[in-house]
Structures are given as structure tokens and as C-alpha cells.
Amino acid sequence: MTISRTAGLFLAAIMLASCAAPAPTVSAPRETEMARALAEQAAYCAARTDTTHPVFHGCVDWHSAAHAHYALTAYERLTGDRAHAAFLDASLTSDGLAAERADILARPDFEQPYGRAWFLRLYVERKLVHGDDRLAPLARDIAQSLVDLYTRTPADPNARDYRSASFALINLLAYGRTVGDASITGFVERAVRTQFMAQDARCDLADEPRGFLSTCASWAWLVAEVATPAELATWYAAWNPGLETWTPVATPANAHQYGKNFSRAWGLSALYKATGDARYRDLYCAHRDAGYAQWTAKRDDYMAVGHWVAQFGMLALAEGREKGVACE
């Protein structure tokens, strides 16, 4: 097989990146400050009773409550601060989780796929931090429901926001790897190669300003998790719609856009880890910082921003750490 000069240069960068030093284990001071503020907001909304769900009853809706629990768990791993551990233990009870599981089983379309993907992210984080399996029964059911969903209807790479197949498969893959389920990881890998890496599959940057979840960044993140260095180099050289030209969303046009910079940062960190290209590091840092500043200015608007954007920020911090991005 021959590859283009662009793909060859990209592959060389990927190979160099694979030799990079591991991610730091201690937060930089500013990162710690950011994480603490984000966690305080997530804790506030998670403790509220905004709905009647037995566990995930705060933060206006089920998925935001689920990712608030994720954010508090991730905060502990990022900082070593157990300030929210007691709340999580009191919230994630066996009876409450059993009731949540019964509800999920009774409503196969509920929070499908977006909220369910966030629950898998919570499961993986809980397993990393505490090693316990209190979330395992519900996680198994949710993982199987995502496999069933994308078996019935092949994943659409351009599905946006609450329907995002990229985000769902990223978290399904993380779950499969965490529990060592080769059938799940194989399912995701096949979906990525057949749907997301297909020659005619393209992401439209013109669509990027819409919504809260970056379709192009999530797509790149997913492929980077699955492809070999050579596969990634060839695919990205043909697919890249110009992610290196991005600038952060300067003025969110609506409430949903307050999450856009953080969600771009997730994928940009994955591209930096895969390629070692400093442009993606710098873009990650710019988007992370812009997202944080916008959240800080708007955090008191609970319905528009305060119930969910902090959790996006925590995932941006966690992915930056995981991918070895140093902004400071």
C-alpha cells in the first residue's frame, strides 16, 4: 500500500507521539483551581431534586445528573481531593441503582444513546477511582442496549448532539476495554472501520457552530481510539475538514453553545496524543480556557448553563490529563 506525502508526514508525527512522556500525575495549580470550581457546581446540581428519578434526580434531567456524578468522580482522580466522595457513596445506593435499572429496562428508548453513554463514562471513572462494581448491572444493560441499537441501525457518523453515534461509541468502547469484553470492543472497532472510516464519510465544518457537541471533534476522537497509526494517518489526511483552522467559539449564540468549546477540546486532546502536533495541543488549551471563561460568566444561570456545562469542562480536563496535554 502506498500513502500520500501528507499521510506519511502525519504517520511520522504519530510514531513520535507514541514515544512521548506519560501524562503528569499531579494537576498544575490552575488546573486544580478549575477542577475545584467545576466540581462545586456539579455537586450543587447533583444534590438537587429536579426530577423524580431515584438516583439521578438533580441537574434538570437524567443525563446531566449522570454526568454530574461522573464529574465528581473524575475530580477525585484528577486532584486526589475526596471532598465529594461521601455524597457519591450516599447517592449511588444499591436500592437506588436497582430502581434506575428497572426504569431503563422498562423504557428502551429512554436517554438513548446520549444519557446512556454518559452513564458508561461514569461507570468507567468509578471503576478507575474506587474499583467497585456497584454500577455494573446497569452498565451491562446499557452497554448491551447500545450494541442492540447500532446493530439494528448502523451508526451515522454525522448524527448530532443527543443522537451522536461518535460519543456513544467512544464510551461504549471505554466500557468494553474496562471490563475486558472483546465482543463489545470488536463491535465498536468494526463500526468505526465500516462507517466512520469509509471513503465517502465526511464531516462538515459548516455544521460545527450548531448544537453543543462537536461532531467533527468527536468523530476524530473515536477514530483515534481505534485506528492503528498507519490507518489513522491515511484516513485523517483524506478526511480532515480543517480542524487545525479552528478558533474557539467567542460568543455563544445560545445556551447549547456554552458546551461547544469544551466538547471540541475532548477531540483535540485525542488528536494531540495521536499526532504530537503542537497545533492540536494549543487548540485544546485555547478551547478549554475559552469554555471555562464562558462557563464562569454564565454559571449562575442554572437552567441555561449551570446544570450541565461544568461537567463538560471536567471531561475536558480529564481528557487533557489522559492525553498528556500540558497547557501551563
Image (cartoon, grey):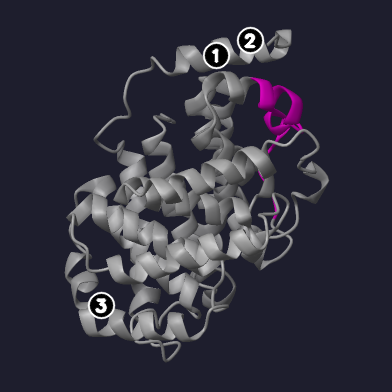
Amino acid type assigned to the residue bearing label 2 in the image: Leu
236 or 291, which is in the foreground?
Answer: 236
Q: Name, please, the residue furthest toward the bottom.
A: 52
Q: Quadrant of the N terminus?
A: top right
| Badge 1: residue crowd in 10 Å (few <14, some 14–19, many ≥20) | some
Give x and y (percent) for residue 245: 73, 30
- Residue numbers of the magenta segment: 234-251
Tell me the residue that label 2 is attached to. 9
Query: Which type of secondary structure does the marked residue at label 2 adopt?
Result: helix
Q: Which residue is mark 1?
A: 13
For marks 3 and 2, give the CA distance. Answer: 49 Å
Image vertical order of residue 254 relative to residue 234, above or below:
below
In the figure, is residue 159 to the left or right of 117?
Answer: right
Query: In this rendering, does residue 7 appear at all?
Result: yes
Q: CA distance from mark 3 to mark 1?
A: 45 Å
Name the residue at 75% across, 57% down.
210
Tell me where residue 136 sits by quadrant.
bottom left
Q: Nearer the viewer, residue 322 or 144?
A: 144
Q: Quadrant of residue 114?
A: bottom right
The image position of residue 95, as x and y in percent, is 23, 85
Label 1 sits on a secondary structure element that is: helix
Q: Disc 3 residue type?
A: Ser
Residue 128 inside the magenta-drawn segment: no
Q: Are marks 1 and 2 in contact (CB under 8 Å)?
A: yes
Spatial CA span between label 1 and label 2 = 6 Å
Residue shown at 34% from the left, 87% from the top:
54
Q: Which badge, 3 or 2, comes first in the chain's sequence?
A: 2
Relative to 328, say whether 188 is above or below. below
The dot on residue 27 is none
Residue placed under numbered mark 3 in the picture: 91
Measured as percent of width and height from the top left, residue 328 is found at: 40, 29
Binning the other alpha carbons within 10 Å of mark 2 as few (below 14), some (14 to 19) or many (20 upward) gives: some
